[in-house]
Image: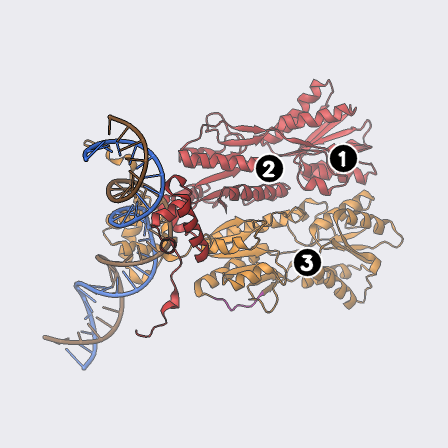
Chain colours: A orange, B red, C blue, D brown
Amino acid sequence: MPGGGADRQRRRVGIVDVAAAAGVSRQTVSNVLNGRDEYYSAATYEKVTSAMQALGYQPNRAAQTLRSRRTTQIGYHIFGEQLDRAQGFTLHFLQSLVKAASDVDHQVLVFTHRRDDPLGVFKDLVARQAVDAIIVSESTVEDERARFLADSRIPFACFGRLAPDLPQHWVDVDNTAGMREVVDVLVAEGHQRFAYLGADGDQYWKLDRLDGVVRRLAHHGVRLPKASVFRGPDQGIRRRARQLLTGKNPPSAIVTGSDAVAAVVVNVAHSLGLRVGTDVAITGFDGGALGLVTEPTLTSARIPVERISRELVTRCLRQVEHGRDDEPGLLLPTELVRGGSA
Amino acid sequence: MPGGGADRQRRRVGIVDVAAAAGVSRQTVSNVLNGRDEYYSAATYEKVTSAMQALGYQPNRAAQTLRSRRTTQIGYHIFGEQLDRAQGFTLHFLQSLVKAASDVDHQVLVFTHRRDDPLGVFKDLVARQAVDAIIVSESTVEDERARFLADSRIPFACFGRLAPDLPQHWVDVDNTAGMREVVDVLVAEGHQRFAYLGADGDQYWKLDRLDGVVRRLAHHGVRLPKASVFRGPDQGIRRRARQLLTGKNPPSAIVTGSDAVAAVVVNVAHSLGLRVGTDVAITGFDGGALGLVTEPTLTSARIPVERISRELVTRCLRQVEHGRDDEPGLLLPTELVRGGSA
DNA sequence: GATCGTCCATGGAACGTTCAATGTGACGGA
DNA sequence: TCCGTCACATTGAACGTTCCATGGACGATC
């Protein structure tokens, strides 16, 4: 093999190349890389970083992970079936999660469960060192995924409050308080005849929202008749909204459990020739993009998605770093968005 | 240190432990793991797999990646701004992508670009060995991301057709053909007065859909007056739909550019007291979940999301394995979904 | 009986990084 | 002079796997 084209397959530039170029040792480069500033002087920092720049060095994550046992990846569990109207919200949340993770130099790995072994993936991902921690959304109070993760001592955080006997690694929205604000606004504007429409399903947050409305109205001394409350699928919502608005003594304000439901109700009201915001007030819950494309825009309780993502990521990292996290669960307030619909 | 609690920090079970338990060498275990069946007998396969089972062995991905230079991860680029109605579709697509990837033992890493350096992330992910390949959706014909990836010799695949001078690593939907089918159905049912409503934006697929409608109607000898064509934002759609339906000589069929637009138009029609599917036909494009929650369900051209995801992943893996892929771009037909709206 | 090919299996080295321990020179106090 | 301390820098080993070259057994062929 004489006369060979030497650099037929050039080696990737690694930490040793940087070390050589900067005239220091491997470990020093590593220290600079990991910001252990008590171990190097300002002068060496300069030498090392400029050598990195010159060589176009990028640390190899596989090697870092192998040695340090940290992946800088967070798993996000996404349901395979989620085909309802919550899609807009879910995507928005995912986007903000990716953003929040990248702000602390982490990536998001999206995964679904296998049908035959719903919980297996969770453990596999960690065992095989694909992720450091897992974020679960739409968790229930007695979430089996959370329980499994806790039992397996896998760092995790849930979007959705957890039962007291579970580790309190959760962040959630104060649905009751959010509805309280919404009701207060409506009452302040003089509304007296209310109705509530929401999606079906027994998720606690759906129940909480209704509950918040009921309680707050009671507090104001306003009656919410049984017949004016309905939770069901989209078609049912549509039918019931029409029924309510065309019946005798129709509600002047319809509070709904989500922006998606509100959008449907707004359309029904339009179809009846009613001016939304004037003839009838309609409110939503979410405060996402959907509320901006309806006409008029929705008055709603905005869920602080960005903050939630940040907090979830923080909770994960604390567990990864300290092996535990004693921070209690976090209940975040919503922010009232005043649109034209109320 | 006598009398020590020996297993205070037990070593993770690795390939050597399996080898020892099975009475074979490391490499043999590795061969079994990677399915190199020409290198081991059925008997050793048995021994090895049962040893793995017994020890609960999970291969360490970091080590595998480091040595083999393969991550079994695919990057998916997601826009930070995507706040329009396409959210439902995007999430659906992501789900199917995760599924398609996991069918070939790969994971999906979701990432966004940094505002200051939109293309940097693409290269970084590959250089740092976070992903093997990248999937780009909503690509334009002259997509700069695609060009960058091609120049950087990074394996990739686009959802959206690419210019001929770019590598043809793309899969797309035949929008024109899809609309052809839709129009054919409407014409067959005797419709003569048409209108077209679609979202604004100059993405080629939006133009293609309109184009498909125009051409096919011409083919049938049906006129589509300029005044009956409109592309614009949601509010504009709503206004124009009302205008069309209440004007003199209203269209009997409204073709729309997407299920999202169709849903809006359906609502407008409802609001005017029209029976959708009887008084006026309305069609969509996507065939996703949205078309099922409207009432009546939408007649639409279904985009074969699952197939698209599979093909995209396949294209990526071919490039990763062979260093290249000469397969041409793939234009997939839609599938006509007959709902009650037409 | 030497040679070859096939089948299965093995051990050394390497992937690129961080951990853990050790070294060095300067400085100050006893 | 000796020792301890501090600030900075270095070296050997390890992480857990796959690549690569080689080895032995066995049967077939010359």
Instruction: Output the chain of dot 3.
Output: A
Task: Give the residue drawn at x 39%, y 43%.
Answer: B41
Circle 1 is placed at which residue position?
Answer: B341
Task: Give the structural element (helix, strand or loop) at label 3.
Answer: loop
Q: Position of residue A307 (x, y in %)?
A: 56, 57
Which dot marks residue B305? Answer: 2
Query: Dot 2 surroundings within 10 Å: few (below 14), some, or many (20 or more)?
Result: many
- The residue that mark 3 highlights is A203
Residue shown at the point (39%, 47%) measured from the top left: B44
A327 falls in the magenta region:
yes
Sequence-first tag of 2 and 1: 2
Protein chain holding label 2? B
Q: Amino acid at mark 1?
A: Ser
Label 1 CA crowd tier, 10 Å (few <14, some 14–19, many 20+): many
Badge 1 element? loop
Of badges 2 and 1, nearer the viewer stands 2
Picture quarter with the N terminus of chain B: bottom left
Magenta includes A277?
A: no
**Mark 3 neighbour class, 10 Å CA radius: few under 14, some 14 to 19, many 20 or more:** few
Residue A7 picture quarter: top left
In terms of secondary structure, where does tag 2 sit? helix
- Residue drawn at point x = 73 percent, y = 20 percent: B223
The residues bearing labels 2 and 3 have C-alpha atoms spaced at a distance of 29 Å
Would residue B156 appear left or right of B254 to someone viewing this image? left
| Relative vertical location of residue A290 with respect to residue B337 in this rendering, above or below | below
Position above or below: B307 against A187: above
Amino acid type at image mark 2: Val
What's the distance in space between the residues labelled 2 and 1, CA to CA? 22 Å
Q: Residues in magenta?
A: A324-329
